[in-house]
Image (cartoon, helix red, strand yellow):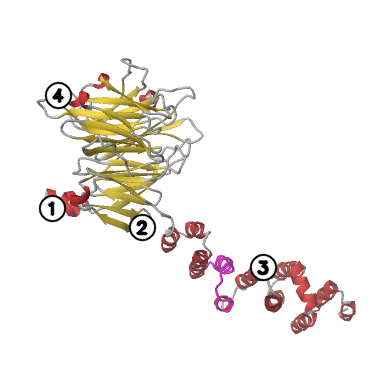
Amino acid sequence: VLRVPSNCTGDLMHLAVSRNWLVCLLGTPERTTLLRFFLPRAIPPGEAVLEKYLSGSGYKITRMFLDPTGHHIIIALVPKSASAGVSPDFLYIHCLESPQAQQVKVRRIEKFKDHEITAVAFNPYHGNESSTGPILLGTSRGLIFETELNPAADGHVQRKQLYDLGLGRPKYPITGLKLLRVPNSSRYIIVVTSPECIYTFQETLKADERSLQAIFAGYVSGVQEPHCEERKTDLTFSQLRFFAPPNSKYPKQWAWLCGEGIRVGELSIEGNSATTLIGSTLISLDFEKTMHLSYGERRLNIPKAFVLTEYHAVLLYADHVRAICLLNQEQVYQEAFDEARVGKPLGIERDELTGSIYVYTVKTVFNLRVTREERNVWRIYLDKGQYELATAHAAEDPEHLQLVLGQRADAAFADGSYQVAADYYAETDKSFEEVCLKFMVLPDKRPIINYVKKRLSRMTTKPVETEEVDDDRKNTIKALVIWLIDLYLIQINMPDKDEEWRSSWQTEYDEFMMETHVLSCTRQNREAVQQLIAEHADPRNMAQFAIAIGDYDEVVGQQ
């Protein structure tokens, strides 16, 4: 994936990607280098040597965060050891580019000394290429800070503590942090995760308000409590991911890798909803079965990280990568790593703009291609009996749509919803005789009449391709019209029924007989129609038919 300059060597340490900008760190014992690639074009990457911020100062890098524009980078630093004599810190890197070259400017942010940054919520609503806008920083002690970073603010970085989830605990890492604004509203949502909890905060801000402090004000004062879901775990980490359709700033789905497995759900788009994370489904990863294993065995059975697509969770393990379908929790893909050849797997990231997934090891970066992941979604929904969704996802494939409509019709018939079943059967290519036999045994003839009428409507709206087909179609139309007339007359002349019954069926029959294609067919087959009406001994409808086709001798004969 990457063309690394020949003068840059070392193992991959960290990687992040956004809007086609991929940033990675390469490290050797002597040197740590940041490289920034623009993936669509094979141009030299931006480069910054970080050694002067690390060497001799006792620091090591723990995490790297890239903003949605691909221009702001935060690198978290912690002491290499307790005896290093330094405090946690972080670097802020601002990137610019011109047609000739990239400019990478590195700064140490000393306002946050003593605080290990473990999560960042960038601001897609106020951030741009020149400034992050107000952002949130989460720490290893459960603190949430607000700050704003830009290259012009040398020495003037603001720091506001907004909330304390750790409540004084020395170790309560914030593992995930996300800032959201509900579409077409001023309602802001903040989702926060720790190893065992997922929290949501929400508040409506004034239109001109930039600071995020007001979101937490009611929670700090005790007026309200953040919504919290706790999941017991012995894991020391969790991971929060979101999936948003392309060009959307508001996610469609959320997922949280925690001690139970992966919890997946949707996000509310209601501006006044009290609940943000809705529809939580658990994808079990059988963590409990690994409790008795040794550390070496257990690390192979617990994912290191994951990314979320529209229909799948892609999980990275110590020796393989696998994809699990969100809809039925079935594994659809797995590929093992040859660690001796490609190196130890480190992480997995997804570019929200392009949907590209990158798996990286200490030696290389792989692009995991996702091709038509929706192709079997219709079948999954069908197997689950979610027919509306199955129909929607099968709509573009006639063969798949026929299977969905047929199964949907069978299910409705089995439930006794005969009218609904008739409507769906009419849209299928199931044998006409087979369907009619199902309905003819029913005492209620409404379903069979509606089914035959819909099949007739399909026949009369199809384009004519050849004379032979046209003749066959005419004969089929004739048979359907004659049969419908017979079914209607049976209902109209059924004994022991009241006048309201007869009047209702008569009105529907009259409307049917005046339809253009029906009138055309009955005129061409008047003798067959007249014979059928005569068999029902129905002089009124015989006279009505005679008037319709202009047979006035017959009209007089019926008087």
Q: Earlier in the sequence, mark 3 or mark 1?
A: 1
Instruction: Kindly report which numbered mark, 4 or 1, lies closer to the viewer in this rendering.
Output: 4
In the picture of the structure, the residue carrying the numbered disc 3 is: 462
Could you tell me if the residues under marks 2 and 4 are in contact, i.e. CB atoms within 8 Å? no
Secondary structure of residue under mark 4: loop
In the picture of the structure, the residue carrying the numbered disc 2 is: 328
Q: Earlier in the sequence, mark 2 or mark 4?
A: 4
Q: Going 36% across and 53% down the picture, which residue do you hit?
A: 326
Secondary structure of residue under mark 2: loop
Compared with 305, 531 (above or below) is below
Q: Which residues are magenta?
A: 416-434
From the viewer's perspective, tell me whether residue 458 is left or right of residue 334: right
The residue positioned farthest toward the left in the image shown: 83
Q: Which quarter of the picture shows residue 204?
A: top left
Q: Going 43% across and 23% down the picture, which residue do you hit?
A: 210
Q: Which mark is residue 293?
A: 1
Image quarter of the N terminus: top left
Q: Which mark is residue 56?
A: 4
Q: Amino acid at mark 4?
A: Gly
Cα–Cα gap, marks 3 and 1: 66 Å
Cα–Cα gap, marks 2 and 4: 52 Å
Compared with 88, 466 (above or below) is below
Q: Amino acid at mark 2?
A: Asn
Q: Amino acid at mark 1?
A: Leu
Image quarter of the C terminus: bottom right
Q: Earlier in the sequence, mark 4 or mark 3?
A: 4
Q: Amino acid at mark 3?
A: Lys
From the viewer's perspective, tell me whether residue 324 is left or right of residue 354: left
Could you tell me if the residues under marks 4 and 1 are in contact, i.e. CB atoms within 8 Å? no
Q: Which quarter of the picture shows residue 526?
A: bottom right
